[in-house]
Amino acid sequence: MSRDATGEEIKKAYRKLARKLHPDVNTAPGAGDEFKAVTHAYEVLSDPQKRRVYDTTGQENGTDNGYGGGFSGQGFGFQDIFDTFFGGAGGGRGPASRTRRGQDALINVRIDLKDAVFGTNKKIDVETAVVCPTCDGSCCQPGTSPRTCDICHGSGQVQRAVRSILGQVMTTAPCGSCQGFGTVIPDPCHECAGEGRIRSRRTLTIKVPAGVATGTRIQLSGQGEAGTAGGPQGDLYVEIRVNADPVFVRDGDDLHATLTVPMTAAALGTVISMDTFDGAREISIKAGTQSGEITTLKGLGVTHLRGYGRGDLMVHIQVETPQKLDAEQEELLRQLASLRGEEFAEGRVGSGSSTGVFAKLRDRLGNH
């Protein structure tokens, strides 16, 4: 039975051993202890969590205590119980392959917000393992080839007799001469030291789709680490980081910006040209516009990553009050205040003011 045996196969093996060792059937000295040991081994193997620990560490519970610590004096330990289930002369798996798939790789790439809105092609430098150009992944010096192992004769495994609770049992183990590969490399490639790959820097051009955000990952299949001995390449994951923009703040697929207008323009109304990612757009400021009012430009936001269309551009109006007035300007404003009956104006207290909405939004969202 192999070490990847199913639960049903393990159960059948246990029943076979239990019938052989049960004290009602086997009256040999120590049969009861042997039956208990096999039963305990089955309890470990039939429990997925305990079996995972054993497969990972080679020991029960990740320790080297053995079954209850009670078998070391008899010349066998808990490992022998598993050899009884898994070992024996049968179940050879053949030589292991030198070829292994390469690992996946992850790199971070920074882009500007405009590139996130429309998408872009970006060149990146990647340092990963690539197939050795000298041996082309064969691991051998050119003109040479692997040789069949003289110890295991190409099987990748050797058998040995071990003493167990059931007597002498034949177990299999990877060949120490060829490390289980069944072949040895007498003349490894000088450039890659017999690994079949080397580290190298290369330049890739990646397509960044419109609508990506910070944290979006782009998968490039087969662009990761080259595998050993000519094994296939892993995948390359590109994680996007979007730089903060000095003008626009992103909220989902909408963009927000603030437009500061003079007090007189807000009072009288005007049209102001504003630069957007789509070029200049005219913003209509109606007479009497207040700070905090929002003008929405439909479809000038971020492209939807999944789906069609774009978000909106929300323009927050900020009315600028003049801070320095000359004598003539001050007199004109006093005349205006007099005409409006506001020489001794009083403020209105309430919670409906929208002043500072964009500043609060920027603090909440951050520049991303």
Image (cartoon, rainbow, N blue to C red):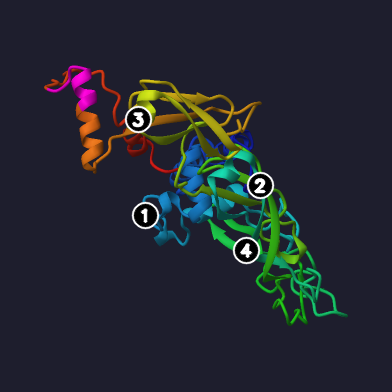
Rendered image quadrant of residue 125:
bottom right
Estimate the spatial distance between the alpha carbons at disc 2 and disc 1, rounded to whole Å: 65 Å
* Discs 2, 1 touching: Cβ within 8 Å: no
Kind of residue at disc 3: Thr
The reply to whether residue 203 is in sight is yes
Q: Which numbered marker is on residue 161?
A: 4
The span picked out in magenta is 335-343
Q: Nearer the viewer, mark 1 or mark 3?
A: 3
Estimate the spatial distance between the alpha carbons at disc 4 and disc 1, rounded to whole Å: 23 Å
Kind of residue at disc 2: Thr
Q: Earlier in the sequence, mark 2 or mark 4?
A: 2
Q: Which residue is mark 3?
A: 264
Q: Earlier in the sequence, mark 2 or mark 3?
A: 2
Q: Nearer the viewer, residue 309 or 157?
A: 309
Q: Earlier in the sequence, mark 4 or mark 1?
A: 1
Q: Which residue is mark 2?
A: 120
Estimate the spatial distance between the alpha carbons at disc 2 and disc 3, rounded to whole Å: 42 Å
- The residue lying at 51 percent from left, 40 percent from top is 42
Q: Earlier in the sequence, mark 2 or mark 1?
A: 1
Kind of residue at disc 4: Ala
Does the magenta run of residues contain 307?
A: no
Q: Estimate how packed mark 4 is, as few (under 14), some (14 to 19) or many (20 or more) residues with alpha carbons within 10 Å.
A: few
Element at badge 3?
helix
Q: Which residue is mark 1?
A: 69
Q: Nearer the viewer, residue 228 or 40?
A: 228
Estimate the spatial distance between the alpha carbons at disc 2 and disc 4, rounded to whole Å: 65 Å
Q: Nearer the viewer, mark 2 or mark 4?
A: 2
